Image (cartoon, helix red, strand yellow):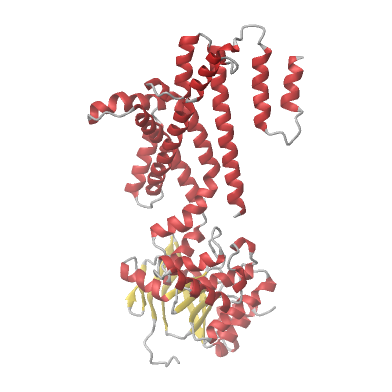
Amino acid sequence: MLLNAVKNIIGSGAPATPMLFRLLGLAALLGLGGCSGNWGWYVVNPATETGRRNLSFLIDGLYFTIGLSVTAILISICLGLMVALPGLSRRRAPKAINRVYVELVRAIPILVLILWVYYGLPQVASLSISVFWAGVLALAISDSAFQAEIFRAGIQSIDRGQYEAAHSVSLNYRDTMRYVILPQAIKRILPALGNQLVYMLKMSSLVSVIGMQELTRRANELVVTEYRPLEIYTVLVLEYLVVILIVSAGVRWLERRLETS
Amino acid sequence: MSAPTQKPFIQISNVSKYFGAFQALDNVSLDITLGQKLVICGPSGSGKSTLIRCINRLEQHEAGEIRIDGTLVDDSPSGREALRNNVGMVFQQFNLFPHLTILENLMLGPVRARKLPEAEARELAMNYLERVKIPEQLDKYPGQLSGGQQQRVAIARALCMAPKIMLFDEPTSALDPEMIAEVLDVIEELADSGMTMICVTHEMGFARQVADMMLFMDHGRIVEMGPPKTFFTAPESDRCKLFLSQILRH
């Protein structure tokens, strides 16, 4: 019977039913289905005061998760572009800089980079860095190597004729990139950039290890006091799910809008 | 207008160009004076496109030199300035900027490279759009226009840079047959207005009409050169005779 219900929700929804609702429905089903057994939803029951307090404690982590991810992705896009451009050069030295950066950064696990930036960097540079900025820095650096590769592929996909036309109206390198190549390249790599944002939102959970009060950290802390890991982590899963589905829908909307222009 | 004694505006001296082992241009020398209309023809791979691309520095020649109005064409600031002030180019594939409207396509060069104020650039663009007979399309994107319209926009875009010489690289080869005439008409009008031009084309009727000098290339060399009258009726080289007989048959 449960299986049938699952099938109903996943399979036979009208084609117009947004994926979001189906997935949320499935998640709710999983939860409610086990209500009689080991589930104890009271910890996050919005009908009780403790539940409400716990829920808002969990959900408030969103500010940090989103703030962290968005700041990091903006920085990583800029960094990535700065790393990508020398990679497109015909000369050897700029190309080498690009290769070394990408290979090096790609080889460091994000978690390791977070720990290194937060605990290691202050010793090297004798500057204290806040948890937030340590997280942003580590995520941005780590992601910038991927951004650089995405930009490189996007820029390389633009037809040679576009460079030639820009040259024929005497645009210099900077203006050619800014007004002709990048606007077209960015349009093409938008799906990939969207993927990176989703990836970043998920990876931001790792910043919990240095004490950032984002979604995952808060869930961990609540579990310690409430001893209900199943329910709390389920809420955590749902939180990420909702945020990421919204972001995905946003990216798709943007793609469609750019397509028509 | 162009007296035979006039100093050449473009001087091409002993230019050679290689693509790997393939020699695209073999010691080409050519002078073009202001007001001249030169049409270059020849089989594919003969170096005709490469020659005009070298003038515009889209290709870099390995030997010889090209001068525009006395200035050496190279990557130096003076070379680039000589190109910016003097040379416009129209491509076979139009190469309009697909993410910009027609008006923006035309204004980009004048605003960014010639540093004209926006209002002046807009006026210039409108003026040239009218000259190529599509003033009503200014807010559309290139993808919404026919091939012939796109190529006319590309001509207007080149003219907005106020060049003294226009280079046409097979401007009608990518067009549907019924759109060739509208583009050739625009180029013809431009020629009548006194614009200096070098045109690579296989449209021999057009060449007869417009050119004051015909040039036949093969294997990277200028094989034959002369005014259209003698060029079409009494070509000297066998290679040119053969080429003309094949191209004029239909």
In this view of the protein, which residue sits in the foreground, B44 or A153? Answer: A153
Q: Is residue B49 above or below residue B245?
A: above
Taking the spot 40% from the left edge, 40% from the top edge, the residue there is: A75
Q: Position of residue B197 (x, y in %)?
A: 49, 80
Q: Position of residue A240 (x, y in %)?
A: 54, 27
In this view of the protein, which residue sits in the foreground, B90 or B128? Answer: B128
Residue found farthest to the front? A49
Residue found farthest to the left? A126
Q: Is residue A228 above or below residue A16?
A: above
Image quadrant in which the C terminus of chain B is located: bottom right
Q: Is residue B143 above or below residue B4?
A: above
Residue A32 lies in quadrant: top right
Is residue A91 visible in the rendered image? The answer is yes
Taking the spot 51% from the left edge, 68% from the top edge, the residue there is: B106
Q: Position of residue B157 (x, y in %)?
A: 51, 70
Q: Is residue B99 above or below residue B109?
A: above
Q: Position of residue B245 (x, y in %)?
A: 64, 80
Taking the spot 58% from the left edge, 68% from the top edge, the residue there is: B138
- Number of marks in picture: 0
Residue found farthest to the top? A37
In this view of the protein, which residue sits in the foreground, A173 or B167? Answer: A173
In the rendered view, does B50 fall on the left or right side of A108? right
Image quadrant in which the N terminus of chain B is located: bottom left
Is residue B219 visible in the rendered image? The answer is no
